[in-house]
Image (cartoon, rainbow, N blue to C red):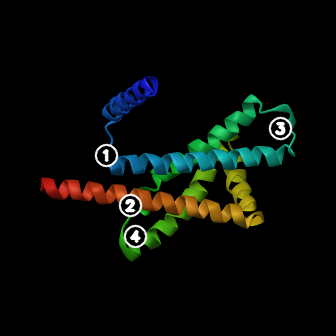
């Protein structure tokens, strides 16, 4: 009993130490979550691409260094595309939602271009968006999950923008 209590207090101290170290506001935490979700899903799409291109043989032999690079390119491409989307993602209101839906297309295309270019310069620039389009058309469930992921990112970024607007409104 005493040991469990000691572990509990140690975890509480650790939580306060980590919280003090990062010191992110709730909106900033949501922004980090949006980027983490998008990068993780991009890495998953990269892994699916590698698995499809190698006809499932990586399940037996494991990932080579180049396969890992493609997975990393998927994560980087999606994260950078979300950053480059700028004001397309996270705006409020009906116009903000419409811009967010255009942002979903933007992140999809630009993320595929970036990931493809990083994975295989020149050829990948063309085949990245083509591969993503084929994957999303051939698997409606994957397309729905990708759309839901980017919609959630849009909402999380909107919460961060709202927090930033309130902060600057107080300062004015």
Distance Cα–Cα, label 2 vs label 3: 39 Å
Which mark is first along the chain, 3 or 1? Answer: 1
In the rendered image, the vertical position of residue 4 relative to residue 164, given as above or below: above
Which mark is first along the chain, 4 or 2? Answer: 4
Which mark is first along the chain, 4 or 1? Answer: 1
Q: Which residue is mark 2?
A: 158
Mark 3 burial class by Cα count in 10 Å: few <14, some 14-19, many 20+? some
Q: Secondary structure at mark 2?
A: helix
Q: Which residue is mark 3?
A: 58
The residue sitting at 72% across, 57% down in the picture is 130
Q: Nearer the viewer, mark 2 or mark 4?
A: 2
Query: Toward which corner of the image does residue 135 lie, by quadrant?
Result: bottom right
Q: Quadrant of the N terminus?
A: top left
In the rendered image, the vertical position of residue 158 relative to residue 6, given as above or below: below
Mark 1 burial class by Cα count in 10 Å: few <14, some 14-19, many 20+? few
Q: Nearer the viewer, residue 116 or 141?
A: 141
Q: Secondary structure at mark 1?
A: loop
Query: Toward which corner of the image does residue 67 lie, by quadrant?
Result: top right
Q: Secondary structure at mark 4?
A: helix
| Labels 2 and 4 touching (C-beta < 8 A) | yes
| Labels 4 and 3 touching (C-beta < 8 A) | no
| Labels 1 and 3 touching (C-beta < 8 A) | no
| Labels 1 and 4 touching (C-beta < 8 A) | no
The residue sitting at 36% across, 47% down in the picture is 28
Q: Which residue is mark 4?
A: 96
Mark number displayed over residue 25: 1
């Amino acid at each position: 009993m005493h040991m469990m209590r000691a572990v509990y207090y140690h975890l509480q101290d650790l939580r306060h130490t980590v919280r003090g170290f990062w010191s992110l506001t709730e909106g900033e935490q949501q922004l980090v979550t949006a980027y983490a979700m998008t990068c993780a899903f991009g890495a998953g799409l990269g892994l699916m691409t590698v698995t499809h291109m190698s006809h499932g043989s990586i399940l037996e032999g494991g990932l080579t260094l180049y396969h890992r690079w493609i997975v990393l390119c998927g994560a980087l491409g999606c994260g950078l595309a979300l950053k480059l989307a700028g004001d397309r993602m996270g705006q409020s209101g009906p116009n903000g939602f419409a811009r967010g839906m255009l942002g979903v297309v933007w992140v999809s295309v630009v993320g595929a271009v970036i990931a493809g270019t990083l994975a295989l310069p020149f050829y990948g620039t063309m085949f990245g968006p083509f591969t993503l389009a084929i994957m999303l058309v051939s698997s409606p469930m994957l397309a729905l999950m990708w759309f839901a992921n980017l919609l959630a990112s849009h909402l999380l970024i909107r919460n961060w923008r709202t927090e930033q607007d309130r902060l600057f409104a107080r300062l004015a």
